[in-house]
Structure formats: C-alpha cells, structure tokens
Image: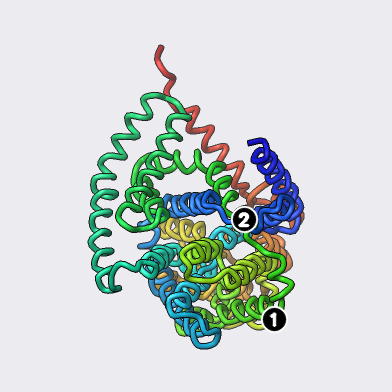
Amino acid sequence: MENILVIFITTVFIATIFNVVLKRFEIPTIIGYIFAGLAISYIFGLQHIETEELNHIAEFGIVFLMFTIGLEFSVAHLLRMKKEVFLYGFLQVFVTGLVFTALGHYLFDLESKSAIVLGFALALSSTAIVLKILNENAEIHSGYGRITLGILLFQDLAVIPILLMISIFTSHTASISLLLLRTLGSAVIVFLILFVFGKMFIERFFNWITTANSEEIFLIAVLFIVVSASFIEHLFGFTYSLGAFLAGMTIAETKYKYRIESDLVPFRDILLGVFFVTIGMQIDLRTIVDYWYIILGLLAGIMLLKAMIQFALLYPFVQIRSNFKSALALFQIGEFALAVFALAFQNRLIDETTNQIMIITVVLSMILTPFVLKNIKTLADKLFREPETEVIMKSTGFANHIIIIGYGPIGQKVAKKLKKAGMPYIIIEHEMDLVKKGEEEGEKIFLANAMQRQTLEALGAKRACAVIVAMENASKIRQICEALVSLDPNINAIVKVRNESHKKIIESFGIRHIIVASEEMAELLTKEALTCELKQN
C-alpha cells in the first residue's frame, strides 16, 4: 500500500512539473501526462510489468473519454453543419482510413484485420488539442475553423465503428456475418434500454437525486449512470467505452447536461490524465533507440499524407486557402488513436513492437501540432495569399450606408438587425465559405480584404454612416483599424474588442466608438438583476 502511495505522489509531482514547463511552450497537458508515465515507469521499474489492474485503469480512462465525447455531442449542431460533418468528415475518415489500411497491408505486411484497425485509427485527429487552440485564436467560426470542427465531429462519431471492429475482429466464436447480425440485434436492444427506457428513467432519477440538495450525491449518481451503462453495453458484447458514449448522449438530452458538464470538468481531466499516464508507462525507450528511423519516417509520412489526402478530397468544395489551413490543422494523429492502439494490443491485433512504434509516433505528432497551429497563417501565406479583393477599384457610388466587416456570428446578427430596421448596408468578408453563405442568404457581400485601403475606399468607407468591425481576431481588428484611420481619421468606426487591454490598443488609433464585450455583458447582467422583483418574505 505504501509503495502505491509513493508511486501516486511521485506521478502527481512529475506530471505537475512537466505540465507547468510544457505549458510555457503551448504544449497540451496530454503530453505532460505521457511524459510523467514514462518517467515513473523507469523510476519504479514498471515498464516490463503486465498487470490486469493496469489494463483496467487504462480502459477506465477510455470510458470517461468516451463519456465526455457523448456528453458534448449535439445533434442540433450537427444538423446545422451537415456538409462539413457528413460530407467532408466522411470523405476524410473513409478515404484516409482506406489509404492507410492499404499501405499497412501491402507495404508493411500487416494482417488484414490489424491493418484496418490501424488504418482507421490513423485517420483520427486530436479534437482536444485542435479545438482548444482554435478557440484561443478566435478562429473557431472562421472558414477553415468550421471545416475543421465539422470533420472532428465526424471523427468522434467514427470512433464507435472502429471500436466495434475491434470487438468483431477479436471474436472467435462465429463468422463475421453472424457477428454482424448479432451486433445489429444487440445494438437494437441496447438502444431501447439506454435511449428509450434510459431517457425516461434518467430524467426522473436526477429529479429525485436533486431533492437531496447535495453536489456529492449528484456526482455519485452521474458516475453510477456512466458505469451502469458501460456494464450493460459490455453484457451485450460491446466495449465499456461505447456504453459510456451512449450514456453521455442520453444525459446530454436532459436539462441536467450543463450542470453535469461543469461538475465533471476537473474530474474528467484527472481521469483522462490517468489514461495518458498509463500510455506513457507503456513507452519503451529502447524502441526509440532501435527504431528511431522508422518512427521519424512514419511521423513525416503520416502527417504529410493525411494533409495531402484531405486537401485533395476537399479541393472541389472548399476555397483553396481554407482547405490548406484545415488540412494543416488535422494532420496529426489524435489522442483516441492511442486508445484504439491500447485495445488492439490487449486483443492481440498488433504486436508489442508495432504498438510501441505507433504510440511514440502519435505522441510526437501531437507535440508538433500546437506549434503548427500557432503559425498556420504564416504557413498559408507562403503558398496561398489572402484572397485579393474582387471589388472593382473605383468609386462604386455607395453613400450613407453601413459597412459590416466580418460575416461571422456577430456580423450575421448585425446584418439581420440592420435589414429589419431597413438600413442600407454592405458586408466585407475575406473567407470564401462565409461569402458563399452570405450570398445564399441574399446579402450584398463582397469577397475582399478589409485590411487594404483600396478595398475600403472602393466600398465607400469615407461616405459611410458607420463602419462596424465585427471580427474576433485581435490582430486583424488592429490592422483594419490602421487601414481605416490612414484612409480618413474621421470615419465613424465602431469596433468590438474582448477586453480592456485590447481596447487601449484600438484607442491609440483614435477610434472613439469601442465596445468592450466583457463590460457590456457585465452591464446587461447587472441590469437584469436590478429589474428582478424582490423576493417577498
């Protein structure tokens, strides 16, 4: 017992130190956990220990990873992004998976079942890393951001059939056709239990649990639902992880979804940390020494091939610059591929050497990803410049109108309000996908770069009633303000910024109308609170 506590304390200490250091280089905590697992495996001599308990701990981490994916799954969101999810996502996963399967089978002489599992696992990208950085860069609603998000959502769905393949391939009791038939029948039964009965039961169950008015009891109830759903799924021949995913989806349909999400954030991250620590414990440094040339070759080959396949597949559908950026964003191998490799290794679909080589390759690809995403604009500029303005560079006759710069979520709402008020307006947007969306909605929208003076001049910025800068990217907002002021300091510019520090930068250009998002939200919240009726004693 004391030895276990020493290992636990050492692991937490090392993981904390690693993550603090790696965070300075914008490397995700996943990598810190893996390094911590690697360190303790050599400190305590655990690298050659094969225990049933360690496998259970690893699968427990996978269970909660799948639960969080299910909890965040939104059917409504998918329906709004049908093309990005079901067309682009399907093409990327299916074609990339087939290509890697063929290469694994014919080039590396892998057995067919192993090649299929590895091939489709390599088609997955890192949802956690990519979406986190897109949010930090305020690019989640950009043209390439929507494409990237849609493909990642489909990849999360594709995890389910990949896990099913492992179950089918490792069964030795029946033919594949019979297994598929049984799987379909079991799936129908599980669906009825978890979605029909479960949906009716869970809502009432949590209504009863909340009468205790205890956060501790509520969290225990959530864990009970997750583990029970996983166990039911396992009884019918599926993985624990699939049950957790369905449990998350079922809870996501209830009014308790957001409470559970907020309560589980630290708990979820710790459990994911446990999983990645166990992955780190499985890394053998001798594999790196013995097979470093294979690992580096696979790393370069997989990332380059993934990006090229996606770029080629989406070329007929997507503006070339957005296509290139989304291909770069998804060129890495995702964290769930590690989970697939772990299950495949446990079920003897891949040998230890192959498992080690793939784990190290995945980890290295994830380490490289934050650096690429932080510099993705610079990389795109080297090959595909920002779209040049398609506006005829002469006076257009626009006057007494409003110019909206940016057709993201804010720009779309501003346009709707101006249209309702009967005000004349035009929109400038440099992302082709958003321009197409505006055209489909009947907007007068121009594909142009608002950071160029000639664009602003051609669209009558000097004669406009107002120029509304409705963008999220702080760097682009600054450059647009520079262009506006250099064209005419008296232009009535209205700019939305995120915080006070950003406001000070924009004020230095002489912009008078600046909306600070955090201040406006605080004011609205306070206003609503003050208009509430006082409770009667």
Quadrant location, the N terminus: top right
Residue at the (55%, 47%) spot, across then down: 271
SS at badge 1: helix
Indicate left or right for 421 with 406 as reference.
Answer: left
**Local crowd size for mark 2, using a 10 Å CA cut-off: few (<14), some (14–19), many (≥20):** few
Residue nearest the observer in this picture, 50 or 236: 50
Residue at the (71%, 75%) spot, across then down: 290
Quadrant location, the C terminus: top left
Indicate left or right for 402 with 185 as reference.
Answer: right
Indicate left or right for 355 with 210 as reference.
Answer: right
Question: Of marks 2 and 1, which one's residue comes earlier in the chain?
Answer: 2
Residue at the (45%, 66%) spot, across then down: 155
SS at badge 2: loop
Residue occupied by mark 1: 382
Q: Position of residue 162 (x, y in %)?
A: 42, 67
Quarter of the rendering containing residue 224: top left
The kind of residue on which mark 2 rests is Ile
Q: Position of residue 36 (x, y in %)?
A: 69, 52
Q: Vertically, is 536 above or below 91? A: above
In space, the residues marked 2 and 1 are separated at their CA atoms by 49 Å
Residue at the (68%, 43%) spot, across then down: 7
Quarter of the rendering containing residue 385: bottom right
Q: What numbered label is drawn on residue 422?
A: none
Seen as rendered, the residue at the extreme bottom is: 106
The kind of residue on which mark 1 rests is Lys
Given this view, does label 2 or label 1 mark the residue nearer the observer?
Answer: 2
Residue occupied by mark 2: 49
Q: Does residue 507 appear in this view?
A: no
